[in-house]
Image (spheres, grey):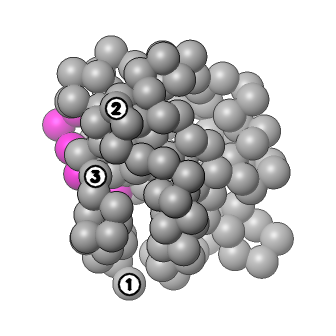
Amino acid sequence: MTLSTVEERVRAELGVRLFTVLAWIPERTALRRVHSSHPAEYPVGGEKTVEVAAGWLDRCITAREPYFGPDRAAVREIFADHELIESLGCGSIINVPVVSGDRTLGVLNILDAEGAYDEKSIAVAQSLAPLAVPALLEVTR
């Protein structure tokens, strides 16, 4: 399954304004963007040497747990690029780790308007994350 198909499923089952997929590059402690619904603002190939709060990295990459930011305040607290996120009309975020066996392959970043997501949305996002495993295995080899 392609990451575009994963995006289509997320769009159909959750709704999304901004969808990106980041591949985890452990040897550089970096995240590389491998898919973007907004390539002008968030180009494929862009890397973050974790511009987000350290707690986010521990949660999503190390502990393999989702992060849920229900409102703009939560987004501002964690993400350095919160102004760009808000300019796209986004104020709610779900980050879901994509895991294969004992390896974190990357993260799905699902964003929409403030208040668009709730606890049920997290469960839906987690159910969709495994769809990205084949594509992320290809790019993280």
Residue 45 in view: no
Secondary structure beneath label 1:
loop
Asked if the residue under mark 3 is in contact with the one under mark 1, i.e. CB atoms within 8 Å, the reply is: no
Q: Which residue is mark 1?
A: 1
Residue 135 in view: yes
As measured in the structure, the alpha-carbon distance from the residue carrying label 2 to the one carrying label 3 is 11 Å
* N-terminal label among 2 and 3: 3
- Residue type (three-letter) at the residue carrying disc 1: Met
* N-terminal label among 1 and 2: 1
- Residue type (three-letter) at the residue carrying disc 2: Glu
Q: Please tell me whether residue 38 belongs to the stretch shown in magenta.
A: yes
Which mark lies nearer to you, 1 or 3?
A: 3
Q: Which residue is mark 3?
A: 16
Quadrant of the image containing the C terminus: bottom right
Q: Residue at x 56, y 64 (%)?
A: 123
Asked if the residue under mark 2 is in contact with the one under mark 1, i.e. CB atoms within 8 Å, the reply is: no
Secondary structure beneath label 2:
loop
Return the mark for residue 110.
Answer: none
As measured in the structure, the alpha-carbon distance from the residue carrying label 1 to the one carrying label 2 is 29 Å
Q: Residue at x 48, y 73 (%)?
A: 128
x and y, in percent, of residue 66 in the image: 64, 51
Residue range of the region highlighted in magenta in the rendering: 35-41
Q: Which residue is mark 2?
A: 114
x and y, in percent, of residue 78 in the image: 57, 23
